[in-house]
Image: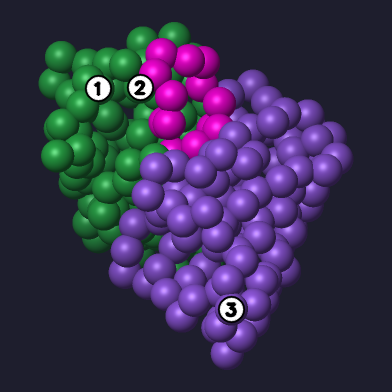
Amino acid sequence: EVELVESGGGSVQPGRSLTLSCVVSGFKFDDYAMHWVRQTPGKGLEWISSISWNSGSIGYADSVKGRFTISRDNTQNSLYLQIDNLRPEDTALYYCARDVFVRTPVRPGRGMDVWGQGTTVTVSS
Amino acid sequence: QSALTQPPSASGSPGQSVTISCTGTSTDIGGFNYVSWYQHLPGKAPKLIIYEVNKRPSGVPDRFSGSKSGTTASLTVSGLQAEDEGDYYCLSYAGTDRGVFGTGTKVTVV
């Protein structure tokens, strides 16, 4: 069974750092680009970041560029999102998702066909 | 990188059709054929229903269809059913490995 499981969320103070993880199973992880998407309370979905199958291409939303770092470890079937200098507006449910296609350039928007259940980050003093 | 524009709500009776628009610019929707649509129900993960503008993943009913003209993409749900109620989002490639979601549309079956 194809599965994505996020972890690492929690309640943190502004200015601190956090690393989210997404462990996958049931498919060949190193064949797929991966994505992070968040949903802020009461609001819609926001694309955050994407990484190609070989980490050769990485993209970030303008709203997080410079503070968020996406990475992956294909030997551990794991995707990561490091969040530095957390802000209250980073409070959200963070999802990881798999790209539709195998070994293609990063093209968020083409399609994300498998999603995790999300991990919640709350930033508050 | 502004969010794509969707109508806040759309509704229809069972059996009717509803079309949701997703308006962008020449640097996102208008520049690429990389638009996907997602159904998002409360407490659940988003579900892919259309990829690459008009392709349906296996298991998605053919009542769902997608199209694009210029800088506007559209999702049409034909033969509306009660289970189609939920929030729908478009997502477009915006160049240089970036994406942008739409503002979301709440579909109600009345």
Q: Nearer the viewer, mark 3 or mark 1?
A: 3
Give the chain letter at badge 1. A
Q: Which mark is residue A29?
A: 1
- For label 2, the crowd category at 10 Å Cα-Cα, with few meaning under 14, some 14 to 19 and many 20 or more, is many
Q: Which residue is at a point 55% across and 33% down the rendered structure image?
A: A110
Distance between the Cα atoms at labels 2 and 3?
38 Å
Q: Is residue A66 visible?
A: no
Circle 3 sits on which residue? B15
Distance between the Cα atoms at labels 2 and 1?
6 Å
At mark 1, the secondary structure is helix
Q: Is residue B43 placed above or below B96 in the rendered structure?
A: below
Where residue A40 appears, as percent x and y from the top left, is: 46, 62
- For label 1, the crowd category at 10 Å Cα-Cα, with few meaning under 14, some 14 to 19 and many 20 or more, is many
Q: Which mark is residue A98?
A: none
Quarter of the rendering occupied by the C terminus of chain A: bottom left
Where residue A117 appears, as percent x and y from the top left, is: 26, 54
**Magenta segment range?**
A99-112
Q: Which residue is at a point 74% across and 36% down the rendered structure image?
A: B28
Circle 2 sits on which residue? A32
Q: Quadrant of residue B30?
A: top right
Give, as a three-letter code, the residue at label 2: Tyr
B4 sits to left or right of B58: right
Q: Quadrant of residue A17?
A: top left
